[in-house]
Amino acid sequence: MKRRISKAPARQPRRSPASKEAERQRRVHLRRKAVGTCVCCGRFPAVPERTQCAACLARVSRRAKERTAERKSLGLCVQCGRPSAKGIYHCRVCRPLSKAFLARRLAAQRRRNDAEKRKSRMQVLIREHLHSLTSRQREVMILRAGLDDHEARSGKEVADMLGVSRQAVSVVEKAAWRRIKRSWTGPGE
């Protein structure tokens, strides 16, 4: 006959009064959220799609603005309160976390990617239609688009290389693009 070993229920560690209070607050917040009242004051109905009433939202917003202004005046990071460089509102740790900063960085990255794609598409288009250009147009387009294993050159640089004015380079380039467009779309379109 096997002896049955009974397991005593595991003892839960004693919680400090602070953790008990935090747990109680969490339960109160969840209850208020379920009912649809403000989780802060519990008196007013919460704003639709939010968990706080308009008064509590305004108070939180006002406090955040005051805290930000105070931290700016002290030269601290507005997000975490660490010291930051003069004139910069975020420390090195929080700088990447700023939504506006991330948005600007992503927008700049998108612009660079779009410019690179445009440049590569333009180079492919020029390569495909070089045969339809005159020798002068071909020379200008190769120099302008950087198809000669160099970076793309400005109109002034091309003009200096060819010994003509910048405006003449622009006229030749525009005529070359018209010819490329005509050969690309076909006559009569």
Image (cartoon, rainbow, N blue to C red):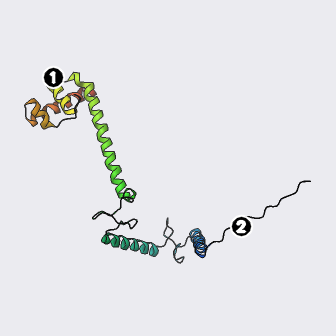
SS of the residue under disc 2: loop
How many neighbours does mark 2 have within 10 angstroms: few (below 14), some (14-19), or many (20 or more)?
few
Tell me: 146 left or right of 32: left
How many neighbours does mark 1 have within 10 angstroms: few (below 14), some (14-19), or many (20 or more)?
few
SS of the residue under disc 1: helix
Residue located beneath label 2 in the image: 11
Residue 101 appears in the rendering: yes
Look at the image and tell me in which quarter the C terminus lies: top left
Residue 124's disc is: none
Residue located beneath label 1 in the image: 135
| Residue 157 x, y percent position in the rendering | 13, 36
Q: Amino acid at mark 1?
A: Ser
- Identify the image quadrant of residue 34: bottom right
45 to 109, vertically: above or below: below
* Residue depicted at x 40% and y 65%: 80
Q: Amino acid at mark 2?
A: Arg
| Residue 67 x, y percent position in the rendering | 38, 72
Q: Are marks 2 and 1 in contact (CB under 8 Å)?
A: no
